[in-house]
Amino acid sequence: GEAAEVPSRTRQPDRTGKYVIDLAGRVDPAPPEAPAVCHLDTGVFRGHQLISGSLASSDQHTIVDPYGNDRNGHGTSMAGLALYGDHLDDLLTGTQGVRLRHRLESVRILTGSKDPVPQNTDPRDYASGTISAVSLPETTSSRKRVYCMPISAKPDAKPGRPTLWSAAVDALAAGKIGEHTSELQSHYRISYA
């Protein structure tokens, strides 16, 4: 289920808002310097009551358009899952306080299925876009973070070979982008913004 909604098998849809308001009042967000889960996705709707205290406007970024908000719900649902785990139903129906130990960051790297597709969505650009996306929160805040990229694309490589996007993510994870930028650029014929 989506992180912001409770499945109808658990309660009536007209009561969902009351459960969300109640839980929002019991949540103690992590402090601004706490570690963050940085989502590389369709953005996050910061106005959601269960997310607003954990995502500062300065922690919302975009590489695809001037809007950092999620307009189709995918990124917001994934952010909710990162904050509350798969226990959201229990938290919504419970009465206990919820103390969060991490925050959220968001980089909108895709517009989402309901938005017009930008001109620069060639899958070969995903690698350089991901590298640019990772640099935005790192230059804004020195907090510790993990990255979550709950999206996929059609393969651009032969079976058994890594895609360009996968190779860029691997290089980022290993901390090798700075060291091997020219090698990656020549091998994959890409440029890093």
Image (cartoon, rainbow, N blue to C red):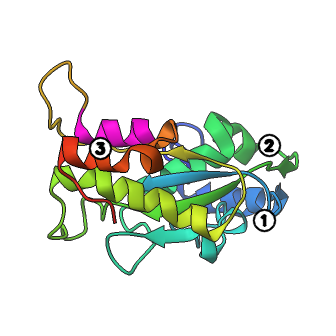
**Mark 1 crowdedness (10 Å alpha carbons): few <14, some 14-19, many ≥20:** some
Magenta includes 60?
no
Magenta includes 169?
yes
**Mark 3 crowdedness (10 Å alpha carbons): few <14, some 14-19, many ≥20:** some
Of 151 and 21, which appears nearest the observer?
151
Q: Give how far apart the Cα atoms at labels 3 and 1 are.
A: 35 Å
**Amino acid type, label 2:** Gly
Q: Residue at x 51, y 44 (%)?
A: 148
Mark 3 = which residue?
Answer: 184
Task: Work out whether mark 1 precedes mark 2 in sequence or the reverse, and give the earlier one.
Answer: 1
Image position of 97 (left or right of 139): right
**Amino acid type, label 3:** Leu
Q: Secondary structure at mark 1?
A: loop
Task: Work out whether mark 3 precedes mark 2 in sequence or the reverse, and give the earlier one.
Answer: 2
- Quarter of the view holding residue 153: top left
Between circles 1 and 2, the one closer to the viewer is 1
Task: Work out whether mark 3 precedes mark 1 in sequence or the reverse, and give the earlier one.
Answer: 1
- Quarter of the view holding residue 167: top left
Q: Residue at x 76, y 59 (%)?
A: 22
Q: Residue at x 49, y 70 (%)?
A: 61
| Residue 33: x %, y % from top left | 80, 61
Magenta segment boundaries in residue numbering: 163-171
Mark 2 = which residue?
Answer: 94
Q: In this picture, is 192 found above or below 178?
A: below
| Circle on res. 32 | 1
| Residue 180: x %, y % from top left | 39, 44
Q: Give how far apart the Cα atoms at labels 3 and 2 are.
A: 50 Å
| Residue 64: x %, y % from top left | 32, 70
Most frequent secondary structure within the magenta stretch? helix
Q: Secondary structure at mark 3?
A: helix
Of 150 and 184, which appears nearest the observer?
184
Q: Residue at x 71, y 51 (%)?
A: 144
